[in-house]
Amino acid sequence: MQATIEHVAHVTECLAGGTLTVLRQMTAELARSHVRQTLIFSRRPDSPRDVAALFPDAVRLIEVRPARGTHIDFIGDLVRALRTLLAADPPGIVHLHSSKAGFVGRLVLRALDARNGARTRILYSPHGLAFLNPQRPWSSLAYWLLERFAGLVDSQPVGCGASEARALATVNRRPALILENAVDPAFFEVDQRDPERPVVVSVGRLCEQKAPEIFAELSVRVRLDAENARFVWVGDGDPEREAMLRAVGVEVTGWLPQEQVR
């Protein structure tokens, strides 16, 4: 039987969108099991202002500067934060979230381990692999090479679904676990009622990874046969993509509180 993990550290460069949702759910669940947690994070323009209010009180928050430009500030802050954490309160597991934190974190942790004579248990969840974009072959190749290089580090890749797990296993050359994104139980408590007309909803950040162009095309195609169909995008992000959705009749609500989303 494995020993109980008393302290888990999460590291992310992307405290926004789906990654933020997963981290909120994960930290809340671990907090209910009385696991001590540390969250090392940086903000993006769409990160909430009051981050502390989103997580259980027991989660210790350590903010580092954003990954911009050459990323020097982000890397330097992350190295210092991890070095201090491992020296003062070593976690049983360090879970790296997002590609940038995953790349830097894996290399830094193993370098610190070599100096300290330790072996940190590392989990890595990209929450969307950047090299899977066929529309940008050269940047995808660069991201693939970076993932392959970081994959030389002994760590456990974790995919949010079967397809991501397969891609991770291929590039990291080791089996990947699957930890699917959870659904808030509150969604199952919402009273359901038949809408007066067909309604299609997408919830997420307006960005390339979420493919709003496909949602826009879908809305046009469906309304050729069902003119009264309603298409709604719950979220915010790229103004150009928002304008594109609105131009084809998709309603864009912007970010809403969870109660309103449900």
Image (tube, rainbow, N blue to C red):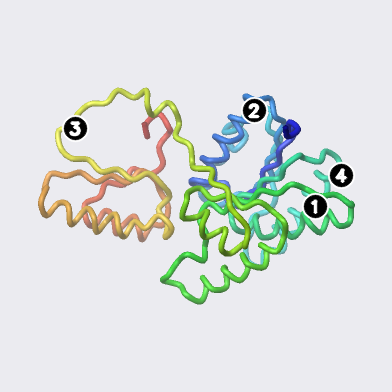
Disc ID at residue 138: none
- Please tell me in which quadrant of the rendered image residue 232 appears: top left
Tag 1 residue: 80
Q: Position of residue 172 (x, y in %)?
A: 62, 61
Amino acid type at mark 3: Pro
Q: How far apart in space, not on screen, are marks 4 and 2 (Cα)?
A: 23 Å
In this rendering, the answer to whether 68 lies above or below 63 is below
Report the residue that reaches farthest toward the bottom: 138
At mark 3, the secondary structure is loop
Label pair 3/4, CB-CB below 8 angstroms: no
Label 3 CA crowd tier, 10 Å (few <14, some 14–19, many 20+): few
Q: In this figure, which residue is indicated by the disc labeled 2?
A: 31
Query: Looking at the picture, how far across and down is residue 77, in whole percent?
Result: 75, 54
User: Which disc number belongs to residue 87?
Assistant: 4
| Kind of residue at disc 1 | Arg
Above/below status of 103 relative to 188: below
Mark before the other along the chain sequence, 3 or 4? 4
- Residue 42 visible in the shown view: no
Q: Nearer the viewer, mark 1 or mark 4?
A: 4
Sequence order check: which comes first, mark 1 or mark 4?
Answer: 1
